[in-house]
């Protein structure tokens, strides 16, 4: 009888461990997919408090665009910067776009170039690994390359030179190595 009880307890523990937790991040994703942006922002704010870089990126996107929250470009840039420096490719791409447009930061085509290059390096590293985020990294890689190609046509020789110097620095400091 004791053996059966031990087996049943073990099965309960194993089945509980295999059920994914409804984390604030995952709840935010579910809310976002339903276009419940206010709820997504609330959930991702909880995840940001624990240092979740994906949540930083996503909350930054909502704040930058004013989806479900008051538009707060300064806060969005702050979140993207922290996530970028932690090696999150999508935030690196968003930060590059902000520098390209000059929305939320002083416009700098050389910094835009560098952040796009960093995003490409990080996404390239991550897209070659067999992870759950493979498809996302491939999409970010494609988007960042497209952004860089468009930007390169508008760069002066000095912006390109400075962009190359900065991109080497950013890649060395912030490009996330493959898992």
Image (cartoon, helix red, strand yellow):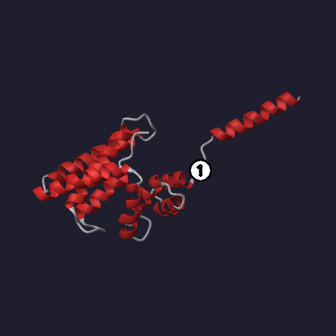
Say which quadrant the N terminus sits in. Answer: top right
Image x and y of residue 169, in percent: 29, 53
Please give left or right for residue 28 compared with residue 88 in the image: right
Image x and y of residue 155, in percent: 14, 56
Say which quadrant the C terminus sits in. Answer: top left
Q: Residues within 10 Å of mark 1 (few under 14, many from 20)?
A: few
Q: Secondary structure at mark 1?
A: loop
In the displayed structure, 127 sits above or below 146; it is above
In the displayed structure, 84 sits above or below 1; it is below
What count of labels does the image hold? 1
Which quarter of the figure has residue 5? top right
Image x and y of residue 46, in percent: 54, 61
Residue at the image point whose x is 19% and y is 57% from the top: 162
Query: Quick one: 19 or 149, which is closer to the camera?
Result: 149
Report the residue marked by disc 1. 22
Image x and y of residue 150, in percent: 18, 51
Residue at the image point whose x is 49% and y is 59% from the top: 40
In the displayed structure, 92 sits above or below 106; it is above
Query: Quick one: 122 or 150, which is closer to the camera?
Result: 122
| Residue that extends furthest to the left in the rendered view of this protein | 157
Residue 176 appears in view: yes
Which quarter of the figure has residue 68? bottom left
Residue at the image point whose x is 27% and y is 58% from the top: 97
Which quarter of the figure has residue 121? top left
Residue 61 appears in view: no
Residue at the image point whose x is 34% and y is 54% from the top: 92
């Amino acid at each position: 009888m004791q053996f059966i009880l031990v087996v049943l307890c073990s099965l309960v523990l194993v089945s509980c461990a295999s059920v994914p937790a409804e984390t604030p991040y995952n709840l935010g994703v579910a809310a976002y997919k339903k276009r419940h942006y206010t709820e997504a922002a609330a959930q991702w704010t909880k995840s940001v408090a624990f240092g979740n870089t994906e949540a930083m990126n996503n909350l930054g996107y909502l704040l930058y665009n004013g989806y479900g929250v008051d538009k707060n470009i300064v806060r969005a840039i702050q979140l993207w910067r922290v996530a970028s420096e932690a090696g999150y490719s999508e935030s690196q791409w968003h930060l590059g776009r902000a520098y390209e447009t000059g929305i939320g930061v002083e416009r700098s085509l050389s910094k835009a170039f560098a952040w796009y290059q960093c995003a490409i390096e990080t996404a390239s590293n991550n897209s070659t690994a067999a992870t759950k985020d493979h498809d996302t990294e491939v999409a970010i890689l494609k988007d960042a390359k497209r952004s860089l190609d468009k930007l390169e046509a508008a760069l002066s020789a000095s912006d390109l030179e400075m962009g190359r110097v900065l991109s080497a620095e950013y890649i060395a400091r912030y490009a996330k190595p493959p898992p």
